[in-house]
Image (cartoon, rainbow, N blue to C red):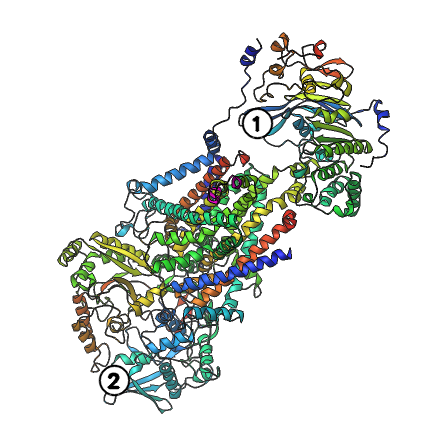
Amino acid sequence: MNKLLVCLLVLALIAVPLFAACDEDGVTTTPPTTPPTTPAEEEPVYGGVMRVVGGTFPSVVGYPPEFSPTDSIYALPCIERLCEWDEDGVQIPVLATAWVVDQDNLTITWYLREGVTFHDGTPWNAEACRWNFQLQLDGGRLPYGQYVESLEVVDEYIFRMHLTDYTWYMIEQYGWVMMISPTAFENAGDTLEERIDWARSNSVGTGPFQLVDFQRDVILVYEGNDDYWREGMPYLDGIEASFIPDPVTAAAKMEAGEADMWIYAQSVQSILDLEEMGLTVNRGTGLSGMFWSLLPNSSDPDSPLAIQEVREAIEYAIDRPAIAEMLGFGEYEPLHQIASQDWPGYVEGYDPRPYDPAMAEQLLADAGYAGGFEISIMATDAARDAVSALQAYLGDVGIDVEPDIADFGRYFTALFFTGWDDLVLAASGINPDATDLFVHFGPTPMTFMTGNIYKSPEYLALCDEALDPQYADAFEAMDTIRDAVMQAGEDAMIIPLWRDLSVAVMQSYVHSDYFMIHGVIWTPYDTWMEPH
Amino acid sequence: MPSIPGSEAYSSDKEKSMAELLKVENLKTQFHTEGGVVKAVDGISYHIDEREIIGLVGESGCGKSVSQLSVMQLISTPGEIVGGEVIFEGQDLLKYKTHGPEMRSVRGAKIAMIFQEPMTSLNPVLTINQQLTEMLELHLGMSKKVARERAIELLGMVGIPSAHNRIDDYPHQFSGGMRQRVMIAMALSCSPKILIADEPTTALDVTTQAQLLELMKDMVERFKASLVIVTHNLGVVARYAQRIYIMYAGRIVEEGTIKDIFGKPRHPYTIGLLKCIPRLDEEEGRKLVPIEGLPPNLINMPPTCAFLPRCSYKVERCFQEPWPPLKRLHDRHYISCYANTEEKTGEPTER
Amino acid sequence: MTTYIVRRLIQALVVLILVTLIVFFVMRLLPGDPILIYVAQTAELEAMPQERIDELRAEFGLDKPIMVQYANWMAGIFRGDFGTSIFYREDVGTLMLERFPITIHLTLLSLIVGAIFGVLAGMLTAVRRGKWLDKIVTPLTYVGLTIPVFLLGILLIYAFGVKLGWLPISGYTSPLDDFWLSTRQVIMPVFCLAIFGVAANARQMRSSMLEVTRQDYIRTAWSKGLGERAVVMRHMLKNSLIPVITLMGVSVSIILGGSVLVERVFAIPGVGSLLVSSIFGQDYVVVQAITLIFAVIILLVNLIVDISYAWLDPRIRYG
Amino acid sequence: MVEKHTSDIGFSEAPVRASEWRRFRRVFFERKLVTFGLVVLVLMVIAAAFAPLLTPYDPYELGDAGESLLQPGGEHLLGTDLLGRDTLSRLIYGARTALMVGFISVFISGFIGVPLGIIAGYFGGVINMVIMRAMDAIMCFPMLLLALLLAAVLREYDVISGIWVVIIALSIAIIPGYARVTHGVTLSIKENEYIMAQRAMGSSNMRVMFRHILPNAFPPLIVLVTMQLGALILAEAGLSFLGIGIDPPGAAWGAMVWDGYRYLANNTALWLSPGIAIALVVFAFNMVGDGLRDALDPRLRGLL
């Protein structure tokens, strides 16, 4: 018998030191954390290489036509755009100093910044700008490319685009094309294929940092660009972005002080623990985080989801505040309309279907599904807990959920191309100026998540109206956008769930506005670190 | 088989009384098994003189092998030596630690042993050279080269043909008989004083058996060593041993010279044993009479003589008194029995 | 001996072809279309025109019938061209050269650590049977057999990386560049990968040692007056190693399997993590290449195991 | 007169040939650890069978808002997981999954692997080549990776779903183990006289194979089974880690360890309890395996 006791003892022995090592209130031996100072008054300090860890990693670094959202964020320190958002979502000039829209003869004229050079020393001018747009068009990846009639170099620093149609949304789409050095690309190989191959792992832009090393799925090493057009910047000597796929390991690295900043941090509990330990968490003004919703296969006539009452019943059956609280530890924002509270398109006081299981059962009965029915919810494994929660709540009203956990290959194909059956748990980015309303749920061809969602004609009409050229930008069109949001709510077009948290966690000595701007824009040039 | 020079001189110096080499006093070895404590060796005493050949005879399970393993302290759990002395060269070997340096200097160097199963007694994954030279290097401090030559010489002596190119072969390339010869060479390699042969020929066919016994006798004389032959077969010791001990149920029941035992056996068990082996010097027609019954269970032994249930000479005393001690009949002939089996040597009571 | 090896090599070739068939067709069973998956994952915000997608499909030869694709791929292998990865738009050969040495480095170390400590522990617990060492180590082997690799990994990270700060938490540096840092970085991953091997080898070694102790030739060895060290090291060890060697063949595939988990926890850019993402992304050629190389490694190790039998046990050599 | 004395002296009769079952029972229960192993297994089967009755809470029912990731103690003996579900209840339901993943996979792969091995060994020649090379091919896939591949495929066709995907995937991955063991045993036994004697007596190949060869394969098979049961449960944990484990809200020890892994710093009971459960069950399987092997193979009795 003693052999057994020893075994249990040993097991405990193994667990105890490790167990003690990771209980949350244990004294941490991380570097002394100075009290978080407000970044504003601090005087920036030059120097230091910032070590960034992230849960995702770029596969292409220097060929914009093939950039995915992740690729473009990692390219930010190196490649710049014509214009970008500020905190409030207003387009501010970067490589272009100004742009003029002439609605009559459908042209956009970009006045480019002077005195800017690429990292290889070649100048930034209208010709380089035209070349980049042409590159995007040839790659078939320029958003709204179908409206571009011709590209014209008017002057050394004036570039004009001739269009077949105009909407205010184009400024953002065209303004966000990332500019790489044409000369570096051209002499990187004889054939186009060779040049593209080169560009995939090399990046020559105008940004505050130069890319010096890229080891796939390992590390990206940037060095400061001395002759950067913003005087006296960047403050950092360099940035090293390494790939840590596992969130728990990334959190451990931050706790151990082995990394300065953790981007794409999504495991809420680790984030809150690190914050408790004195690290700074940039939740970002405006809208960081993803917009989670259940997209119904409502365009399929014989699916129960085609019936509006069924969709409404599903919305009533889910206690979104409770789930958001549980999954997000209070950081998630439960949603009740196709817009978040921090969002300009938000309709005050419009909460059509708060949690009401009785009403849900009633609606199901009206729709002829008194005995309930079985549906499947497709989701990725990361949303496993969310699916369990939805399954429990829907189960209470008789909707028997059969989870369909898909690998990301099948998930994205279904979402973007082949469509899905019943429900899919989807997460989409949120733009401050409500433009994603159109991008994700608006009319084709822009939207990619149309799939098989039924959109009422009224809703589509409102979307088109919002994009009417008479509006100069999103803010002018906001009333129509709010009407569209209301209409989507009325139609129970989709079932909004919650907005999750995706932030940057930083050591206390790091000052950066990373993810300050809507989870998409980062201004690495003004990031700096106190000596540590 | 070439006769080894100097063997005819053997009979002459047999009469000279030799100094006593090994004396075992009241040796007791027990095994703790699930069923209880098995008293495999229940207090035996014997001795062996220089250059003497003695036989230790008994049925299987009478403790003869265990006694020899105890002398070499090769008893492993669940066995345990619980009493007695083994005096060798003035020292009691049992005082030494089982694997202590003193015991190790005795094993193989002074007292060597060969075993019953030649097929499994040699390490299958090491060459004969490795297993032979091991002892020479250890006990005699020979260098590898010298040890190898000595090994080849030894193999030649035990009759292994073309020893020099067979030395690097592996055990499985030798026949049973050949392997036993290698064992003999190995045992005698450090010219030990005593060679214990534990049922050396049991696993071999009769012809090889005879050759091996002849070989062992010659080698033992050649190395001026004494030999203990442990066997259940009286025929084997008849030609070679000078003195014989008969063992039964962990004890010695009769001890005597070859003439005493084969001439006038006095212990009922010995008599019984002799009755069930054919004799060349007899007329035909004698019926072989096996001893009835089975050897006793060694766990809960009665205090009285263990052979009682199978004994056909038993008398009143045998039932009352404990196991009779060895009493001396004459000269070097002892038995442990109350009955007087002298007059009835011819016709035991018919069952 | 050589005929034995030649026969085994032919067998290995047959097996390899079977492996390529299995992985090729099982991957094709996945209903997704790799091109769509690739485009979906890297789509900025706009749908890609259909003809561009067809162009891509032709570029990767996915428009040809399956058997032709298989033939092209097999032909390519003999030319050393493993095809181009859809997701990484990189020649698979370079991908392999980039990432395989890392996994092999970890696997080799884990095998060696598993063997040495496993055999040592097994030997000690057998020789010291019933003593305190045996009472501690033998139950510990069960912990080794049952602890999930990724859990052990993160516990080590928290204990030695965060709380004690002795070891770097993640990452990999080639030993050629910075040997000392590389060693410190691989200590924890190798420990995770090797623990199953240590436990399994220790148990097997212990039981085979106990078996060997009862053999006659060991009693002969003792009777020759050899010391415990000589009996154990010279006589018992070689005989007990035979069943342990068989375990080596099995533990290689367990380690390769485990590397998938360990590489993710310790952020090591080995082949394991690449394989998982390629399976989900249906990046056929990458999965096929990695599986093929895994198969070669496993077959090679098993061949070495069988040959070492003959070296260990002469009866087999001449049998 | 002679007979009387024999009896009252108390000589014990030679031990009567103990019936096979009594000896099996005596040897099996001789070592306390083996008994302990059996007790654990019995408890596990009971827990799995009567899970609904034994669990203090419904393992799938969400806790209230504040009950997420509670520490052990209080109402929830072992604390709760992220969704406030009671860890103890999920542990008990987990026994059901572990048993299913363990036994059914072992049963399926044994049912396929064992005959294949015997047939390959018995007939030899081309059949042997084909079967054994196929087995080698499957062996070339590390178990976890083959399971990953198969699970990804099986999941697409949702002909089977949830736990069965994991079971089928793992079963196929471990078939070669059985084939190789029985193949080896068949080869070693095939030459024995009593097999030839059977053939000489005209018994059919099937009879020889399954009446005479198969029983000899039991001891090594039992050892293989006990070793593999542990590996299977760990593989399930691995699959959960890679994202294709048991479907939610299923309770499986492997998935719970994966949950515990993600919330390591906040609730150690979340990973420690399934971890200990897995260790205990594998320890029990191995002990029972050792016990069975001893009992079925008298030669080794009482020595290990």
Give the image location of residue B60, x and y in percent.
64, 26
Question: Type of residue at label 1?
Answer: His
Which quarter of the image is occupied by the C terminus of chain D? top right
Q: Residue at x 71, y 47 (%)?
A: B169
Residue C255 visible in this rendered orientation of the protein: no
**The one of A434 and B108 positioned closer to us in this rendering:** B108
Residue contact between numbered discs 1 and 2, judged by CB atoms under 8 Å:
no
Judging by the rendered image, the residue that carries numbered circle 1 is B32
| Residue B294 placement: quadrant | top right
Chain that bears disc 2: A
**The one of B140 and D135 positioned closer to us in this rendering:** D135
Judging by the rendered image, the residue that carries numbered circle 2 is A165
Q: Is residue D226 above or below residue D247?
A: above
Q: Which residue range is magenta in the image?
A: D198-210
Q: Residue A315 shows which numbered tag?
A: none
Give the image location of residue D180, x and y in percent.
50, 49
Tell me the distance, in whole angstroms, between the alpha carbons under discs 1 and 2.
101 Å
Question: Type of residue at label 2?
Answer: Asp
Q: Which residue is situated farthest in the left direction here?
A: A366
Q: Describe residue A494's horizontal placement relative to residue C262 as left or right.
A: left
Which quarter of the image is occupied by the N terminus of chain D? top right
Give the image location of residue C253, x and y in percent.
50, 55
Of helix, strand and loop, which one carries label 1?
A: strand
Q: Is residue B241 above or below residue A463?
A: above
Asked if the stretch drawn in magenta spans residue D203, the answer is yes
Judged by depth in the image, the label closer to the viewer, 1 or 2, is 1
- The reply to whether label 1 and label 2 mark residues of one chain is no
